[in-house]
Image (cartoon, helix red, strand yellow):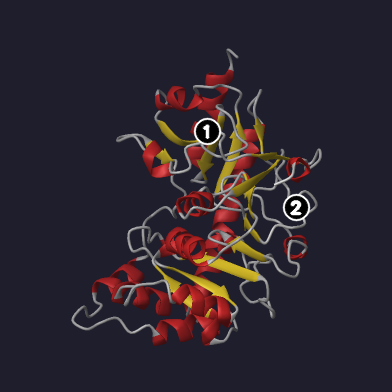
C-alpha cells in the first residue's frame, strides 16, 4: 500500500491496526457487582414479559425451521426472503463476512464497535482504520477511493451519532461493499436513517440485532439484509441449523406490527430519558458530551484518566472508552437510564472532575 493511502486529511486520521487497542473488550467486562450498570447498553427492565413467555414456551423437540422467521423479517422490512439471513447475533454476521469475503482493501470507520475489525484480523485480512474526529460525524471523503469493503455503524457505538441516510449512501460505489451496523437503529422512532427497507441493496449489507431493544443478549439472534448473492455466500459459511428455535420464535414475534409499534413507543420514552441525561451532563463543568446522541447511550470526554474507577466510589459502573480506536483514557460511554439515575450520575461526575 502506498504512503498516500494513509494520508486522509484533516477530517480524519488513518491509523495502522498495529496500534494497541483491546478490540475484544466489551461493556460487560466493566460491570462491577453491586454498582449501577451504565456500562451495558441493553434495554433496562429485562425482556418484555410477553416475549419471555413466548420464548420459554417454544417447542425444543424438533430441528429449527427458519422459514417463518425469514418471511416475517422480510415482510417487516419490505424485502424478498432471499435478502435475509438469520444469524446468532450481529457478532456471527461479522465473522461470516470476514470469512467469506476477500477484500483487497478493508476499511473500518472508527470509533465504532470493534467486533468488525477483530473478525477481519482473525480471518487474516489487513485492515485500515479511518478515525473520525470529534464530534464524530460521518464524512465519506477520507475513505480511500480503492476501499472495497467499508464498515460503519448507524447509530454508531460508542459515539451514539446517527448519520443521515444520504451521507451513508455516499460511501457506496461500484466494486465496494458497505456494511452498516444498525444494532441501535430502532432507538429512534420510525428509524429515519435506517437502510433496512432501502429499495436497492446493491453494494450494501445491513446488520440488525434483537439484543438491545428486546433485552435478548443471552439468546444470540440477529440478521443480515443484503443482495441475494451476498446472502447465499454468507449462508454457505454457516453450520446447519445456526439459529435456535427460541431465537426463531423471537424473530417472528418481534417482526409483528404490534411489536414494531411497541418499539416505537419504547424509543419515544428512551428519547425523553436521553434528552434528560444530556441536559444534566451539559451542566457538568469540564466535560464534553458528543452532541446529537441518538442511541441508548451517550459518549463523554471527562479528561480524567481514571474516571471509571473513581465513579465506582459513587456507585456507578461505566464503559471505558480507551479500547475504541480514536478514544483515549478519560472517555466513557454511559447508558441512558431514568431521570433519578441521571441526576446522581451528573452529581458524581461534577465531584470527580472538580479537582482536575
Percent of width and height locating residue 262:
50, 70
- Image quarter where the C terminus lies is top right
Percent of width and height locating residue 157:
57, 49
Residue that badge 2 annotates: 144
Name which of mark 1 and mark 2 comes first in the sequence.
Answer: 1
Q: Residue at x 67, y 61 (%)?
A: 148
Q: Residue at x 39, y 29 (%)?
A: 315
Distance from disc 1 to disc 2, alpha carbons, whole Å, reads 23 Å
Q: Is residue 137 above or below residue 210?
A: above
Crowding near the residue tagged with mark 1, few <14, some 14–19, many ≥20 C-alpha atoms within 10 Å: few
User: Is 261 on the left or on the right of 122, as rendered?
Assistant: right
**Front in this rendered view, residue 96 or 45:** 96
User: Is 38 on the left or on the right of 278, as rendered?
Assistant: left
Q: Residue at x 57, y 45 (%)?
A: 158
Q: Any mark on residue 34, and which?
A: none
Percent of width and height locating residue 86:
44, 74
**Front in this rendered view, residue 174 or 261:** 174
- Residue furthest to the left in view is 61
Q: How many marks?
A: 2
Callout 1: helix, strand or loop? Answer: loop
Q: Residue at x 33, y 66 (%)?
A: 49
Among the 4 quarters of the image, the one containing residue 177 = bottom right
> In this rendering, does residue 154 appear at all?
no
Percent of width and height locating residue 88:
39, 66
> In this rendering, does residue 25 appear at all?
yes
User: Is 289 on the left or on the right of 255, as rendered?
Assistant: right
**Front in this rendered view, residue 129 or 306:** 129
Among the 4 quarters of the image, the one containing residue 305 = top right
Callout 2: helix, strand or loop? Answer: loop
Q: Any mark on residue 20, and which?
A: 1
Amino acid at each position: 500500500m502506498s504512503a498516500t493511502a494513509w494520508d486522509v486529511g484533516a477530517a480524519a486520521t488513518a491509523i495502522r491496526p498495529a496500534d494497541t487497542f483491546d478490540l475484544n473488550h466489551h461493556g460487560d467486562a466493566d460491570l462491577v457487582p453491586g454498582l449501577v450498570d451504565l456500562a451495558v447498553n441493553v434495554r433496562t427492565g429485562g425482556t418484555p414479559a410477553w416475549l419471555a413467555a413466548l420464548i420459554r414456551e417454544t417447542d425444543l423437540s424438533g430441528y429449527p425451521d427458519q422459514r417463518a422467521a425469514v418471511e416475517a423479517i422480510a415482510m417487516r422490512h419490505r424485502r424478498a426472503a432471499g435478502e435475509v439471513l438469520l444469524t446468532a447475533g450481529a457478532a456471527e454476521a461479522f465473522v461470516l463476512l470476514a470469512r467469506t469475503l476477500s477484500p483487497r482493501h478493508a476499511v473500518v470507520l472508527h470509533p465504532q464497535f470493534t467486533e468488525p475489525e477483530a473478525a477481519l484480523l482473525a480471518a487474516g485480512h489487513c485492515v485500515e482504520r479511518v478515525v473520525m474526529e470529534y464530534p464524530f460525524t460521518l464524512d465519506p471523503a477520507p475513505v480511500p477511493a480503492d476501499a472495497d469493503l467499508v464498515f460503519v455503524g448507524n447509530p454508531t457505538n460508542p459515539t451514539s451519532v446517527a448519520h443521515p441516510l444520504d451521507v451513508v449512501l455516499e460511501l457506496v460505489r461500484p466494486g465496494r461493499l458497505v456494511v452498516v451496523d444498525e444494532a441501535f437503529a430502532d432507538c429512534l422512532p420510525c428509524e429515519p436513517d435506517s437502510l433496512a427497507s432501502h429499495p436497492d441493496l446493491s453494494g450494501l449489507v445491513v446488520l440488525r440485532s434483537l439484543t438491545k431493544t428486546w433485552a435478548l443478549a443471552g439468546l444470540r439472534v440477529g440478521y443480515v439484509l443484503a443482495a441475494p448473492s451476498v446472502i447465499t455466500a454468507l449462508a454457505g459459511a454457516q453450520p446447519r441449523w445456526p439459529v435456535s428455535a427460541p431465537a426463531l420464535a423471537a424473530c417472528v414475534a418481534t417482526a409483528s406490527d404490534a411489536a414494531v409499534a411497541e418499539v416505537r413507543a419504547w424509543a419515544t420514552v428512551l428519547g425523553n430519558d436521553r434528552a434528560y441525561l444530556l441536559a444534566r451532563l451539559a451542566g457538568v463543568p469540564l466535560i464534553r458530551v458528543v452532541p446529537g446522541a441518538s442511541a441508548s447511550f451517550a459518549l463523554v470526554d471527562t479528561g480524567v484518566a481514571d474516571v471509571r474507577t473513581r465513579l465506582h466510589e459513587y456507585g456507578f459502573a461505566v464503559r471505558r472508552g480507551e479500547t475504541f480506536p480514536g478514544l483515549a483514557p478519560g472517555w466513557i460511554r454511559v447508558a441512558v437510564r431514568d431521570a433519578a439515575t441521571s441526576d446522581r450520575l451528573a452529581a458524581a461526575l461534577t465531584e470527580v472532575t472538580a479537582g482536575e
